[in-house]
Amino acid sequence: MNKIPMTTPLVELDGDEMTRVLWAAIKEQLLEPFVDLRTEYYELGLPKRDETRDQITLDSAEAIRKYGVGVKCATITPNAQRMTEYHLHEMWKSPNGTIRAALDGTVFRTPILVDGISPVVRNWKAPITIARHAYGDVYRGVEFRATAGGRAELVFTDRDGNEARQTIYDFECDGVVTGQYNKDSSIASFARACFQFALDTKQDLWFSTKDTIAKKYDGQFKEIFQTIYDAEYREKFEAAGITYFYTLIDDAVARVIRSPGGFIWACKNYDGDVMSDMVSTAFGSLAMMTSVLVSPDGKYEYEAAHGTVTRHYYRYLEGEQTSTNPMATIFAWTGALAKRGELDGNAALQDFAAKLERACIEIIESGTMTKDLAALWEKGTPNVVTSDGFLSAVRQRLEAALA
Ligand code: NAP
Ligand code: MG
């Protein structure tokens, strides 16, 4: 068989532990036999990040900026325990956070649905994608412990030194105070990434805040979204037959539960943190959740939403054949290959990505799956396989589809 050619390389970001093992197996079993895979490889495994003092992470982000599409394996975010385990020079920051900051990007998380594993919410028929604004608000807030008899004030000093002052509260008893901020530039990038992604995936975009209460703060989010929509996206949305819809967060929650799914829900930082866990749990499994980072100028980085699956890795190191689910990591690759194909006008590559996704879904729907899905399976006794068993079943099905 002739391998499918690629014109532009994908930026490949390798990672750690069990997902690193899966990464190599996916390439060997499902990609390299069929595609003349061109990648620019970045080693983001923790030892290399430490050795390069994390320069490799910045370099990989720069490469995504240059080529436009990257695919990333899950990576360890170091904590105290990892410092000892890997003898690290420093507690390096999360690569995802570093790359997100470098690309000024927004993360979109989407579940992979299969027939035979139903969402907890009965009427959800299509995936709901959550877009979380990953900057500011309570995550960059400052906090104070207030004491009885004190006054909390908000003081803003402008560039000329003029002070604006407002009383928050005169405390008659002990209490708590917090100060939060966000930036117009960050909100605008978030808005553009959401509008862009909605157009790319031809789905409606919902956005929710609490602007009836936070009139200036959340009102600014609402205003920026609306202004950018009217000026840059309204016509494109109308041409694509999709809509932009703003509503209050509490109204959105009620509507989301009643909806059939199939749209993007843009959330402020805290709302996105909470809602994405609720939505992903209700759809089934973290192992079936994909994630893509989209920058406002249309650069893409695809990955799985889960981590490096450490518990399985330690068993793998002891020689056990684990039943770790490779779906989200495979879909990171297919997402990236399809986007590369789209940007390069490479229909064969797009077709390959679609067939590989189809093959994965059909294998699960035929009853063959990894252990994590077995408990969720509703159609009798599943055939539970190891990761390798799953990959070879998918490979057979893919070969048939490509023949
Ligand atoms: P995790 O790797 O997502 O795994 C948590 C648990 O979820 C696993 O022990 C496993 O449960 C289940 N699970 C997750 N993915 C699975 C899969 N593909 N197949 C089967 N089961 C799966 O989270 P973690 O253990 O909290 O974090 C491990 C490391 O990953 C940490 O060092 C963290 O820093 C890193 N991390 C990286 C990213 C990223 O790069 N995007 C994201 C999150 C965490 P059972 O053990 O019960 O089978
Ligand atoms: Mg969270």
Image (cartoon, helix red, strand yellow):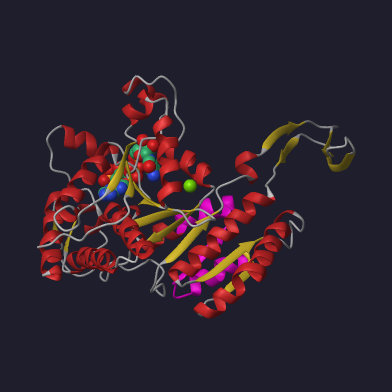
Residue 279 pos. (x, y %): 45, 60
Residue 325 place in picture, x, y as percent: 24, 52
Quadrant for the N terminus in the image: bottom left
| Residue 261 part of the magenta segment | yes
Q: How many marks?
A: 0
In terms of image quarters, where does ligand 1 lie? top left
Q: Quadrant of residue 208?
A: bottom right
In the image, residue 67 sits, relative to residue 197, either above or below, namely above
Q: Is residue 133 left or right of residue 202?
A: right
Does the magenta run of residues contain 158?
A: no
Residue drawn at (35%, 48%) of the image: 306
Q: Is residue 218 left or right of residue 249?
A: right
Q: Is residue 249 visible?
A: no
Q: The C terminus is located in which quarter?
A: bottom left
Q: Position of residue 185 (x, y in %)?
A: 66, 50
Main secondary structure of the magenta stretch: helix
Q: Which residue is found at the position 23% from the left and 65% from the top?
A: 352
94 or 139, which is in the foreground? Answer: 94
